[in-house]
Image: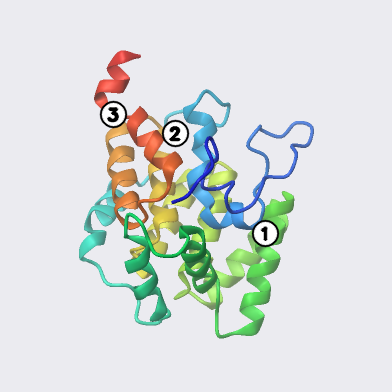
Amino acid sequence: MSQKEGKSPFMSYAPARPCAAGEPKLCRPTPRHAALGLYVICLVAFHGGSLSPPMTSQLPLDPVFQLILELPTRAPSPGLPHRLTRLFQELALSEPVRPVEDIEDQIWALWGSHEDRVAEETMAAAVEALSSGALKKARPLLDHLVAKHPDWPEAWNKRATLASIEKRDADSLLDIAQTLRLEPRHFGAIAGFGNICLRHGHLNEARAAFQIALSINPHMEDLRDMLENLSPHHLMLH
């Protein structure tokens, strides 16, 4: 992916708004920031931020990790747009013919689309609430979407994003799992699982998840940098 030096894949989608007083330096996500969702949340924690919760044994890590290891053998839900197949074939190329950002934008647009116009409007309202930091407003909207449209992967993914922002990591993991059962190519959700592992000190699981996410979308350079930082050799040097 053509990417300016020092610019994360999130920032290539949309700049984060300025931080308000008392917010973590990550700030709240803008709409496209929320699209890639979970993966950015632990970038701050990994590099010395203040988002890490205490270690917990209550996280359903093992079953979700097993699901992620099985993703290469799983087929997407038949209800997903068929155009995604061609887009993921393009995305997997080391040097696609057209800009990677265009391919990614189309994937996110298709993930976020729904035949029910009211559902799309509800999703847009939820994303806007996430973007503005109105998390209490976003939660009932996303709860409604997953209840009414349980076969919509992006509804589950957005609710996983909200849960992770609120540090409800067990809830986030359950929603990540449902996202991936429906859409095993969801590189954002896979990377989000890795970041939750990272936040709780499960480095081997984080490495594996990041590798799988990059096998689907090899153009997430910040994720590749994180994977390099998690290599045993790099960790030994620190």
User: Which one is nearer the viewer's eye here, 215 or 179?
Assistant: 215
Residue kind at label 2, given as amino acid type: Arg
The residue identified by callout 1 is: 138
Label 1 close to label 3 by CB (< 8 Å): no
Question: Dot 2: few (<14), some (14–19), or many (≥20) neighbours within 10 Å?
Answer: many
- Decide: is 216 above or below 227: below
User: Sequence-wise, which precedes: disc 1 or disc 2?
Assistant: 1
What element does badge 1 sit on? helix
Element type where label 2 sits in the image:
helix
Between the C-alphas of marks 1 and 2, the distance is 23 Å
- Furthest-front residue in this view: 97
Residue receiving disc 2: 199
Residue 209 place in picture, x, y as percent? 32, 46
Q: In the image, is residue 128 above or below residue 85? A: above
Asked whether, in this view, residue 127 is left or right of residue 163, the answer is right
| Distance in Å between CA atoms under marks 2 and 3 | 16 Å
Residue 50: x and y in percent read 58, 26
Q: What residue type is disc 3 on?
A: Ser
75, above or below 214, in the image: below
